Image (cartoon, rainbow, N blue to C red):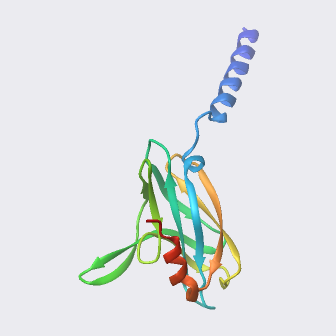
Amino acid sequence: MNYKRKLLAVTFSALTAFASANTWASQADDLQVNNPYAREVPPGAPASASFMELNNPTDHDITLTGAQSAAADIVELHTHTNDNGVMRMRQIPQIVVPAHGQATLQPGGLHIMLIEPQETLSAGQTIEVQLQFSDGSHKTVSMPVKSLTGMGMQMQHGHMH
């Protein structure tokens, strides 16, 4: 009986190790992130935002469900909505990147809010934002902090037509 228990324990351990190795790619592994950056904020500003292009080359949707960063106390997924001609930001639960498609996080649209920054975010710095996905995987993205004055040119060059 003791032998069978040991064999069962060893078999269970091997199966657990194999399952945790996860031979399938995760959403974080599959997602491609291009042109990430965070917006510079003046001292004392209550929030900043980060932007990027998310590309999904796979046959299945990838769902971004949240983000974290040591650069801010609160990190949220947001979008802009038109409320009777007034643009308003609101928190959203997820951003879906469609199969063989992309989602563009940009000023005036989808973005990641960095609320209550830990320090002044100045051009030239680099911050990290960890993206979290519906399958439990995550991807850390390093991004430069860019000045507001350079945003117009950056966005024109960042669009792909």
Q: Nearer the viewer, residue 114 or 109?
A: 109
**Number of disc labels:** 0
Outermost residue toward the top in this view: 1
Which residue is drawn at the image coordinates 60% and 84% (left, top)? Answer: 40
Classify 94 as above or below 107.
above
Classify 12 as above or below 140.
above
Screen quadrant of the N terminus: top right
Instruction: Measuring from the top left, give residue 37's x and y in whole percent.
Output: 60, 72
Horizontal relation, residue 110 to residue 139: left or right? left
Outermost residue toward the bottom in this view: 43
Instruction: Measuring from the top left, give residue 69's x and y in whole percent.
Output: 63, 68
Horizontal relation, residue 26 to residue 99: left or right? right
Which residue is drawn at the image coordinates 41% and 72% (left, top)? Answer: 109
Q: Residue 6: which quarter of the image? A: top right
Instruction: Measuring from the top left, give residue 87's x and y in whole percent.
Output: 34, 82
Horizontal relation, residue 81 to residue 117: left or right? left
Which residue is drawn at the image coordinates 67% and 23% (left, top)? Answer: 12
Which residue is drawn at the image coordinates 58% and 49% (left, top)? Answer: 137
